[in-house]
Image (tube, grey):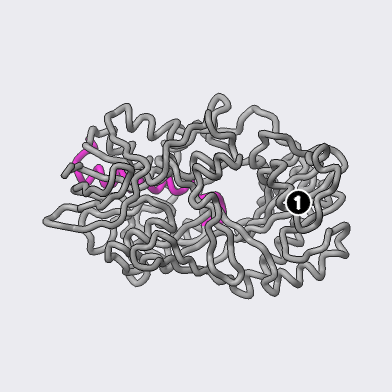
Amino acid sequence: MISYDEVIIGSGPGGAVVAHQLAEHRRNTLLIEEGPRANRYTHTPFSMDEITRLYRNQGMGMSIGPPHVNIAEGRCLGGGSEINSGLYHRLPDEIRDLWQKKHHIQSFSPSDLLPYYESIEKALSIHSPDTPHSLAALKLKTGADQLGWYCPEIPRWVKDGVRQSMSETYIKAYEEWGGVVMDQTRVIRLRHVSGQWEVYCKGSTGEHVIRAQTVFVAGGAIQTPLLLRRSGITRHVGTTFGLHPTIKIIAEYDDPVSQLGDGVGRFQVKEFSPSMSFGSSVSTPAQIAQGLSNYGIPPSFKTDWNRFAIYYAMISTPTMGTVRSLYHDPTPIIRYRLSSPDFIQLGLAFDRLCSLLWASGAKRLYPSLPSAPVLHTHSDLNCVKEGIEKGKVHLMSIHLFGSCPMGENRSHCAVNSFGKVYDCNGLYVSDGSLLGGSPSVNPQGIIMAIAKRNACEYSHQKGLLG
């Protein structure tokens, strides 16, 4: 049986940052990843090939509603950082303050978090690139300017045109320092025996057991609570799952607005933050065609598909769901039921997104809603908005969080302020599960800063820092 000082389960932003921190101090560490190694040279971004190989369940996860919410998770070395758009946010102060008060989180002030943000931003080369904006993003900015809405450019983690994912940065350094990676290996359960943790795994070479003094679980807001619950750790685990409900609209323009290779635009409308925000999405011919399938794809689509672009409205809500599974079945059962105020908020977000797109010059709008008509003017909106408020809506989300919240308020926190699982020596959580609710923005930058903070606290307790 092989033994390590620390085992990190999951190689996304939370796990990779912790692994990097420990390997820097020459700890004997193992990083376990269920998915394969991602290679940006062999998978076209946002292509079917990438979705098939690097997403969990080919990007077809789902929560049980009503309404159902389609959920996309990364499942590869580097996690979601390998497949996302690389937009970076710090945690808004008003939300940080809310979490700190609700969960009694220690060492969570702006000054406490600042050095960890700065460390992450330096490592990932966070900045606003000099590369041109996509035409779809510029349309969004035009519409916002017409309406007088705040529409900032969001910085990205990119260097010399290359997205600075975990495999490009933290995991690369981790392996250079001697850290061990075991990919395509699923962790089945954990067991605490004689002061050590036994990690039961299943990979291409069969089943085996690994021992470690300390285990960091970083499988994400769905997989982390499932593993903990399979291991008999259930107190406040998987009972406060959150996500950002997102609705999409395809806008049609007179002139081209999309081209192959466009990702998520760097402009985001923040006029109504933190309750809602708007942006442009990935718009490949296949994705646009799928979105238009309910309306009938125009005969000229093959030649003029680039006149269409996909946009989204994302809301932030306090609604919480649960994450469970059947005994030893890896399939998650996610229950997430939106409230009446959520549907009203979605209807308002939809209304505002339509207004924004018409102000940008869109001629026709195709909502991702069941049986919705093509929208030409604002007078077409009422029936559609009423349907949304009644729950007739198709939703998706890629931002998942909060299923094992951190803090000293043990009435609802699964782990302490630094990620240690209560009543479990040597067991930590390090991913989006820790978040105290909806961050209202892409959470990956926040997850990395918290992971760095917690890893430094762990290193201090172990006497690894000078």
Report the residue that reaches farthest toward the left: 194
Q: Quadrant of the C terminus?
A: top left
Q: Quadrant of the N terminus?
A: top left
Examine the rendering and report whether any part of residue 94 can be seen. Answer: no
Residue 204 coordinates in the image, percent (x, y): 33, 43
Report the residue that reaches farthest toward the top: 160
Residue 325 coordinates in the image, percent (x, y): 40, 66
Q: Residue at x 20, y 52 (%)?
A: 198
Q: Quadrant of residue 355?
A: bottom right
Q: Residue at x 76, y 68 (%)?
A: 385
Q: Quadrant of residue 394?
A: bottom right
- When the figure is inspected, residue 221 is found, relative to residue 343, above or below; the finding is above
Q: Residue at x 21, y 58 (%)?
A: 191
Magenta region, residue range: 439-466
Q: Is 274 contained in the magenta span?
A: no
Q: Residue at x 81, y 54 (%)?
A: 296
Front residue of this view, candidates 264 and 352: 264
Q: Is residue 402 left or right of residue 22?
A: right
Residue 250 coordinates in the image, percent (x, y): 76, 51
Examine the rendering and report whether any part of residue 200 can be seen. Answer: yes
Q: Is 450 contained in the magenta span?
A: yes
Q: Amino acid at mark 1?
A: Ile
**Residue tagged by mark 1?**
250
